[in-house]
C-alpha cells in the first residue's frame, strides 16, 4: 500500500507538472499569435506605389484587349454580313441566303471563345514555364498576329481571314484572362489585393466601351471603317510590349516556384513603398512551407486532391456565374435586343454605348468597396440585382407582345427595356464582373494556382462559347422568354454563393487555404480560422526553434490514447514541428494527450 501511495503521489506530481507546462505552452502560443497579428497589420498598412501602379497598368492592357475584342464585333454586324454576301457572290456568282449569313456571322462571333478556351487552358503551363510576366510578353505575338489578320480581311476579300483572326485573338485573350489576374494577385499587397484585382474588370469595361464608341457610324462603324476597327486590337499588344519589360516578375513566382530569393527581394523592393520587405518574404515562406507537398501539381492531381476539390468547385461555379448570368447575351447582341424592344437602330447603338459607360463607372465605384465590403457580399448583391432585372427584361418583352398595338405602351415598354438592361449591367459590374477573376486566384496557393486558373478559365470560355453560339437559337425558340433561363441560373448561383463561398477579404493565401484544409470537409468556419491562427504562430516561430527532437514514442503499457511525456522544451518543439507538418496530426495528438491527462487526473 505504501509503495502504491508513493507511485500515485509521483503520478499526480507529474500530472501537475504537465498541466503547468501546457499552460505555459498556451501562453507562448498566445504571444506568438499576437506577433503574427502585428505582422499581418504591417502587411495591411502597405500603400500603392508608383511602380506598383505602373506594373498593374502594363499588365491589365491584356484585359483591355479582352474587353475590346468582346464588344468590337457587335456594332459593325450588318457591315460584316454585307461583306460576306459580296465576297460569296463574287466567288460563286450567287446570293448567300440570310440563314447562311447569320450562321457565318455567329461563327465569327463564337470562334473567339473557342480560341479563348485553348488559350485559357494553356495558361497554367505557360505561367509555370515562362513566368507570369514572360508569358504575357510572349502572348503579344498572338495579339499582333490576330489583329493583323482581321485588319486585312477586306483588302484580301476573304471572310475566312476574319474568322481565323478572331480565333487567334481569342487564344491571346484566353491567355490574358489566365495570366493577368494571376500576376496582379501575386504582386498586390494584402490590403490592396481586392481593389487592384478589380482593375482587371475595369480594363475589360474600358476596352468594351472603346470598341462601342469607335464602332458608331460617325467614326468607324461603316463599310470602309470596320476593318480598321477590328485591326485596332493591335494597339494594346504593342503598348504592352513597350511597357511590360520594365516591370518585375511576380515575387511569388521567383521565390516559391524558382527558389530565387534574392531576385524576389529585389522585385518586392521595387513594388513596395519601403525596402523593408521581410513581412512579405516571411508570408511567402509560410505559403511555401504549407505547400511543399504540392509545389508542382498537375491538373489530374488537382482534381484528385480532396483538399483542393472544394476551392476548385467554387472557382468553377464563380466563373459560370459570370458567363451564364446572361451578360454576354447583352454584350454580343445588345443592339438587336434594343431594336427588338422598339428602339430605332441609331438609338439602339447609343443605348449599347450606355452599357459600356455604365460598366466603367460602376466598376470604378466597386474598387474601394472590394476591400471594405468584401468579395462574397458584393457578389451576392450583384447576383440578386441581376436576377430582379432579368425578370423585368422579360416583362418588357411580354408587354410589347400583348400591348404592341398601343403606341404609348410601346414607348413606355422601350424605356423599361433600356432601364432594365442598364440596371442589369450595373449589378453585373458590382459583383459577377470582377469578383470571379479575383477570387479564383485567391483560393489557391502558389503550387496549384496555375492549374486551377487554367481549369477555371477554360470553363469560363466554354460557357462564353455556349452563350455566344446558342443565344440566337434560344432567342428564336423562347422569343419573349429568352432571359428566363438566365434568371434560373442567377438564382442557383446566388444560393451557392450564400452557402459555399467563403469571404477572402484581408486574408493571406495561407489563411484562405486553411479554410479548406480538412480531409473530411466538415470543418466549421471557426475551426478553419483556428487553424489559420495556429499556422501564423508556426510561421513566426520557425526562425527561433532549434532542430526538432525525435518523435515521442507511444507508451505500449496503455492504449492508443497515451503518449510518454518529455521535458518541456522537447514537447514544445514536437508540438510545433507537428503543427508545421500536419494540422490533423497535431489536433489528434492534442486530443489524445488531453484524454490521457484527464484519465490520470
Image (tube, grey):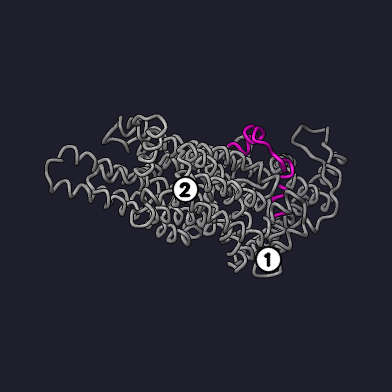
At 35% from the left and 29% from the top, the residue drawn is: 94
SS assignment at label 2: helix
At 51% from the left and 57% from the top, the residue drawn is: 199
At 64% from the left and 52% from the top, the residue drawn is: 137
The alpha-carbon separation of the residues under discs 1 and 2 comes to 33 Å
- In the picture, the quarter occupied by the C terminus is top right
Tell me: 437 left or right of 413. Answer: right
**Could you say where residue 344 lies in the image, as x and y percent from the top left?**
24, 49
Q: Which mark is residue 242?
A: none
The residue that label 2 is drawn on is 69
Which of labels 1 and 2 is toward the front? 2
Compared to 429, does 596 lie above or below?
Answer: above
Q: Quadrant of residue 123?
A: top right
**Could you say where residue 281 lies in the image, as x and y percent from the top left?**
72, 59
Q: Main secondary structure of the magenta part?
A: helix
At 58% from the left and 41% from the top, the residue drawn is: 119
SS assignment at label 1: helix
Numbered range of the magenta stretch: 284-309
Q: Is residue 113 visible?
A: no
Magenta span includes 302: yes
Mark found first going from the N terminus, 1 or 2: 2
Amino acid at each position: 500500500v505504501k509503495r502504491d501511495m508513493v507511485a500515485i503521489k509521483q503520478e499526480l506530481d507529474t500530472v501537475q507538472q504537465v498541466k503547468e507546462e501546457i499552460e505555459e505552452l498556451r501562453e507562448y502560443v498566445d504571444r506568438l499569435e499576437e506577433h503574427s497579428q502585428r505582422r499581418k497589420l504591417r502587411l495591411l498598412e502597405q500603400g500603392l506605389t508608383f511602380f506598383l501602379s505602373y506594373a498593374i497598368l502594363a499588365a491589365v492592357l491584356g484585359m483591355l484587349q479582352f474587353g475590346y475584342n468582346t464588344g468590337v464585333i457587335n456594332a459593325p454586324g450588318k457591315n460584316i454580313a454585307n461583306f460576306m454576301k459580296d465576297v460569296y457572290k463574287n466567288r460563286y456568282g450567287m446570293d448567300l441566303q440570310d440563314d447562311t449569313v447569320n450562321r457565318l456571322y455567329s461563327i465569327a462571333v463564337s470562334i473567339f471563345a473557342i480560341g479563348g478556351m485553348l488559350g485559357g487552358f494553356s495558361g497554367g503551363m505557360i505561367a509555370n514555364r515562362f513566368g507570369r510576366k514572360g508569358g504575357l510578353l510572349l502572348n503579344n505575338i498572338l495579339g499582333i498576329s490576330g489583329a493583323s489578320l482581321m485588319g486585312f480581311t477586306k483588302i484580301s476579300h476573304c471572310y475566312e481571314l476574319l474568322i481565323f483572326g478572331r480565333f487567334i485573338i481569342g487564344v491571346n485573350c484566353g491567355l490574358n484572362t489566365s495570366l493577368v489576374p494571376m500576376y496582379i494577385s501575386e504582386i498586390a499587397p494584402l490590403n490592396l489585393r481586392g481593389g487592384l484585382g478589380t482593375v482587371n474588370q475595369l480594363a475589360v469595361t474600358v476596352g468594351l466601351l472603346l470598341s462601342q464608341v469607335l464602332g458608331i457610324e460617325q467614326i468607324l462603324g461603316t463599310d470602309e471603317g470596320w476593318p480598321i476597327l477590328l485591326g485596332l486590337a493591335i494597339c494594346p499588344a504593342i503598348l504592352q510590349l513597350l511597357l511590360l519589360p520594365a516591370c518585375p516578375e511576380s515575387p511569388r513566382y521567383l521565390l516559391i516556384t524558382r527558389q530565387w530569393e534574392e531576385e524576389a527581394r529585389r522585385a518586392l523592393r521595387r513594388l513596395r513603398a519601403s525596402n523593408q520587405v521581410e513581412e512579405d518574404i516571411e508570408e511567402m515562406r509560410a505559403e511555401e512551407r504549407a505547400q511543399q507537398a504540392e509545389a508542382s501539381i498537375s491538373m489530374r492531381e488537382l482534381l484528385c486532391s480532396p483538399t483542393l476539390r472544394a476551392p476548385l468547385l467554387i472557382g468553377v461555379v464563380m466563373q459560370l456565374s459570370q458567363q451564364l448570368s446572361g451578360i454576354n447575351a447583352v454584350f454580343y447582341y445588345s443592339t438587336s435586343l434594343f431594336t427588338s424592344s422598339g428602339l430605332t437602330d441609331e438609338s439602339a447603338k447609343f443605348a449599347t454605348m450606355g452599357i459600356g459607360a455604365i460598366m466603367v463607372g460602376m466598376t470604378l465605384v466597386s474598387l474601394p468597396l472590394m476591400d471594405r465590403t468584401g468579395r462574397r457580399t458584393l457578389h451576392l448583391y450583384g447576383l440578386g440585382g441581376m436576377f430582379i432585372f432579368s425578370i423585368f427584361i422579360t416583362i418588357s418583352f411580354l408587354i410589347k407582345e400583348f400591348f404592341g398595338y398601343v403606341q404609348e405602351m410601346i414607348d413606355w415598354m422601350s424605356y423599361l427595356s433600356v432601364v432594365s438592361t442598364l440596371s442589369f449591367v450595373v449589378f453585373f459590374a458590382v459583383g459577377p464582373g470582377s469578383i470571379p477573376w479575383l477570387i479564383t486566384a485567391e483560393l489557391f496557393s502558389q503550387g496549384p494556382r496555375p492549374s486551377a486558373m487554367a481549369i477555371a478559365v477554360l470553363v469560363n470560355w466554354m460557357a462564353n462559347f455556349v452563350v455566344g453560339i446558342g443565344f440566337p437559337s434560344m432567342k428564336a425558340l423562347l422569343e419573349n422568354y429568352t432571359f428566363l433561363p438566365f434568371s434560373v441560373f442567377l438564382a442557383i448561383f446566388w444560393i451557392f454563393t450564400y452557402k459555399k463561398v467563403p469571404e477572402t477579404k484581408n486574408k493571406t493565401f495561407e489563411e484562405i487555404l486553411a479554410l479548406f484544409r480538412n480531409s473530411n470537409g466538415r470543418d466549421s468556419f471557426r475551426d478553419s480560422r483556428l487553424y489559420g491562427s495556429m499556422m501564423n504562430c508556426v510561421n513566426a516561430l520557425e526562425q527561433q526553434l532549434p532542430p526538432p527532437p525525435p518523435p515521442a514514442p507511444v507508451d505500449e503499457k496503455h492504449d492508443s490514447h497515451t503518449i510518454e511525456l518529455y521535458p518541456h522544451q522537447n514537447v514544445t518543439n514536437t508540438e510545433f514541428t507537428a503543427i508545421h507538418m500536419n494540422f490533423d496530426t497535431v489536433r489528434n495528438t492534442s486530443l489524445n494527450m488531453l484524454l490521457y491527462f484527464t484519465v490520470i487526473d
